[in-house]
Image: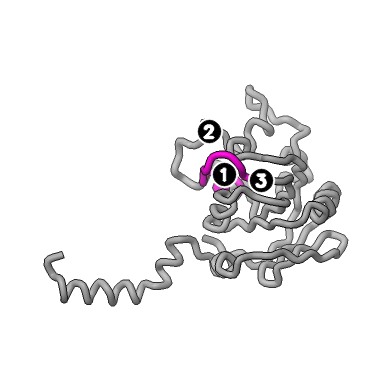
Amino acid sequence: MDKFTTLSGIAAPLPLINIDTDMIIPKQFLKTIKRSGLGANLFDEMRFTQDGAEIPDFVLNKPAYREAQILVAGDNFGCGSSREHAPWALLDFGIRCVIAPSFADIFYNNCFKNGILPIALPQETVDILMKDAEKGANARVEIDLDAQTVTSSDGEVFSFELDAFKKHCLLNGLDDIGQSLQKVSSIDAFEATMAQSRPWV
């Protein structure tokens, strides 16, 4: 998993509440267990017509936001079924950070396991960042994970709270497997001891 330290990127405004995981990646795209390729179908039913043509008015289809790395969204982002394909699709598209007033718990935790930083901020702060994002490609938002700050294109700085362990994992690029590998010497020592004391196992 890639480390997350700082990010300077275009923020796309998506002022909708209750964006569920089926909206993020519809169920027909859940057949794969690969993490790559899902970005093409991110927000599929909002991005494309039934014939596969782009819907010009959807934010990620607009030229200014095609390279967006940050999403500013409404309350209760990631609700619905607990599909890890949702953060996979966001990451494959290029989204590394989602800012919203609140997140569904399972989606929130899945983000950290996949290198995405979900930032929960008060509604009034999200409203400010939403307006900032509406300026387009020239309005770059700065994220500093170590300092736990979001800086708007106008230089306004907002602090966010984050669990220390989740922060550690993102800063060091540690998913569940990476966390286990940090203990590899202890695991090897335990297995060696077990092999001597219980060779029949």
Residue 27 shows which numbered tag? 2
Q: Position of residue 140 (x, y in %)?
A: 79, 57
- Would you name the residue on which mark 1 appears? 86
Circle 2 Cα neighbour tier, 10 Å, few/some/many (<14 / 14–19 / ≥20)? few
Q: Quadrant of residue 165?
A: bottom right
Please identify, in this view, whether the residue under mark 3 or under mark 1 is nearer the observer. 3
Q: Position of residue 160 (x, y in %)?
A: 72, 64
Residue 77 shows which numbered tag? 3
Q: Position of residue 131 (x, y in %)?
A: 85, 49
In the image, what residue occupies the spot 81% across and 49% down? 130
Disc 2 marks which amino acid? Lys
Q: Residue 79 in magenta?
A: yes
For the residues labelled 2 and 3, the Cα–Cα distance comes to 17 Å
Disc 1 marks which amino acid? Ala
Disc 3 marks which amino acid? Phe
Q: Is residue 52 visible?
A: yes
Q: Is residue 138 visible?
A: no
Span shown in magenta: 78-90
Task: Report the front residue among 150 and 78.
Answer: 78
